[in-house]
Image (spheres, rainbow, N blue to C red):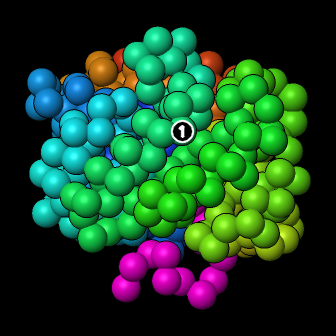
Amino acid sequence: MKYLDSSKPLACLAPMDGFTDIAYRQIVRKLNPEVILFSEFTSTSGIQYSEKVKSRLDFHQVELPYVIQLFGNNPESFQRIVQELDGKGASGFDINMGCPAKKIIRSESGAYLMSQPDLACRIVESCVKATSSPVSVKTRLGFNQADELIPFVKKLESAGVGMVTIHGRTYKQAFRGEADFQPIYELKKEVSIPVICNGDIKNSDDGLSRLENLDGYMIGRAAVGNPWCFWSEEKRKAVTLKEKIEIMILHFKRLRSLKPEPLALIEFRKHISGYISGFQNAKAFRSVLMECKSEHELTHCALSLV
Ligand SMILES: Cc1cc2nc3c(=O)[nH]c(=O)nc-3n(C[C@H](O)[C@H](O)[C@H](O)COP(=O)(O)O)c2cc1C
């Protein structure tokens, strides 16, 4: 079954560069059999020249439904890469049209594509030609203003896009202010494809309560070190520190199985706060865990906390 055929609201783990790698996706999957997992965004030009870049998109069957997110600005490159990756069995392909980072905008990719609707449509058409899996777009309310949203997405819909995720901020806003979902509700009245909302959603109860006419929600920052965010409040409240620490250790071990120990320890630091937040003495625990110099030390320290 295609992930878009679900009759329930779609719950999605946001693509997050440096966070939603294979190790973390597998942890989210372990606790959430149905959540749609997005890869970190990956450069279409990088993939052509570097096996290391390409390996960011590796996944295991257990991660399905799993959507590969790509960024770039050349329709032919998108077509070639989607064709090449299509046989690997991912559930779909997502095109990043929302990243506001200077480097990405300078390369005329990400949120820049909102200012170039014709090019954005050619990219969608190229991807649609290359796969029978759904091609989606993740974007923002607009480049400058939210009134750009409806015309932009209508064009993408005509080009064949199968779903859109909208982060409720404009490019200009970057991460400032609060995400505004009103333009997203208005958009859904004008298109027939699934529309997913994103921005500042804390957990599944929050996402479901803000759904209105939409087809699903996507959680990013609140999912860092918190794979339980997709659980109901009742279930979340029952999670103990011991359970959190056990999952944290499992996450580290998955990462460690893919990377040399010193690198895995450094990369894992950014996940630690999330795992222990809300618990007594979290600040002190955090400093201890951040200083660990080996897998053995991290595991030992973490277990000694419970
Ligand atoms: C560290 C970080 C990395 C991100 N990487 C990506 C990415 O690779 N692709 C993408 O479409 N959005 C990326 N985003 C944006 C998120 O997917 C999401 O749209 C944004 O954080 C708003 O949702 P949230 O409030 O739930 O975090 C990233 C955000 C953060 C904080």
- Against 29, residue 42 (above or below) is above
What residue range appears in magenta?
A: 1-12
Residue at which label 1 appears:
117
Does 295 appear in magenta? no
| One can see residue 301 in this view | no
Q: Is residue 254 left or right of residue 109?
A: left
* In this rendering, position of residue 27 left or right of residue 76: right
Is residue 214 visible to the viewer in this orientation of the structure?
Answer: yes
> Is 24 left, or right, of 245 in this rendering?
left
Measuring from the top left, give residue 92's x and y in whole percent.
36, 62
Against 124, residue 64 (above or below) is below
Question: Which residue is pictured at 74% across the width and 32% down the height?
Answer: 170
Is 9 covered by the magenta stretch?
A: yes
Q: Position of residue 273 (x, y in %)?
A: 64, 32
The residue that appears at 83% across and 51% down in the rendered structure is 183
Q: Is residue 271 above or below residue 122?
A: above
**Residue 263 in the image, given as x and y percentages of width and height:** 30, 21
126 or 47: which is nearer to us? 126
Q: Is residue 190 left or right of residue 259?
A: right
- Point 39% across, 79% down: residue: 2
